[in-house]
Structure formats: structure tokens, C-alpha cells
Image: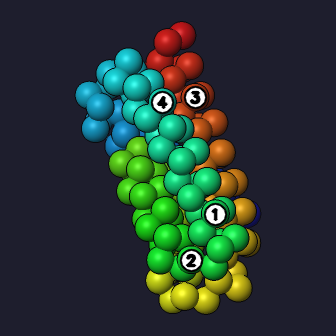
Amino acid sequence: MDSQPEHVSAEAESDRLLDQEHLLEQVDHDYDLLNELLDLFRKSCVENMREAREAIARSDAGALARAAHAVKGAAGNLSGMDAHDAAERLERVGRAGDLGEAAAGLAALEQAVEELESALERLLESGRG
């Protein structure tokens, strides 16, 4: 079996988590700026995830959709497509008003955001080293 498809698949999976090349182009390879963006992302995610959890607890589908939309934009700005897509799925749950899948969607989003933050940290470390 040819190993190239596995390599391409692993690379594509990595790009879904964090498209490093695109992100570095967006910040003109400025790692200080990237660090600032990561700090802002973390702060906004803490707030938006709290809002999402509270929205689920009070069955507020509109607030859930707004919180997920904010995370979707932040993740997309950092070229984190897995987190963007998880947030988009949660946003659709909120917009549909059917919160039966909200807790699972939030858990998936939290996992995707953690993975994106880790990938961003590794990228910052590689730029400093």
C-alpha cells in the first residue's frame, strides 16, 4: 500500500486543526502578534464558553447560538478549522432551538478549542526556538 495517501491525510488533518502556513501569512510571520492573538483568543473563549454553558443551563438557544458564533469567528481568524466547524455545529444547534445535542456539541467544541490552543502554543514555541 502506498504511504503517500497516509502522509497527505495526516497533513490535511493537521491543517484542519491549524493551518499554520495560512496563519503565519496572515500575521506576516510576526510571532509577537501571534502571541497577542492567542491571548485574546483564550480570553474570548473563556467568556464565550461560560456563556454557552449558562445558555444551555437556562435553555436559551439564542444565547447559545451567539456564544458559539463568537467562538467560530475567533477560531476561523486563527485558521483553526476543526474548532471553527465545531462552533458552527453548536451554533446551528442553538439556531434550530433543539438543545438536545447542545451538551455534546459544547464538549466537542471545548475539545477542539483545547487542541487549537495547544497547536498554537507549539507553533509559537517553534518560532521562538
Looking at the picture, how far across and down is residue 80, in whole percent?
Answer: 48, 51
The reply to whether dot 1 and dot 4 touch (C-beta < 8 Å) is: no
Q: Quadrant of the N terminus?
A: bottom right
Disc 4 marks which amino acid? Asp
Residues under labels 3 and 1: Cα distance? 28 Å
SS under mark 1: helix
Residues under labels 4 and 3: Cα distance? 11 Å
SS under mark 4: helix
The reply to whether dot 4 and dot 2 touch (C-beta < 8 Å) is: no
Q: Earlier in the sequence, mark 4 or mark 2?
A: 4
Q: Earlier in the sequence, mark 1 or mark 4?
A: 4
Residue corresponding to mark 1: 54
Q: Nearer the viewer, residue 40 or 125?
A: 40
- Residue at image x 65%, y 74%? 58
- Residue at image x 51%, y 38%? 43
Q: Which one is closest to the eye, mark 1 or mark 4?
A: 1
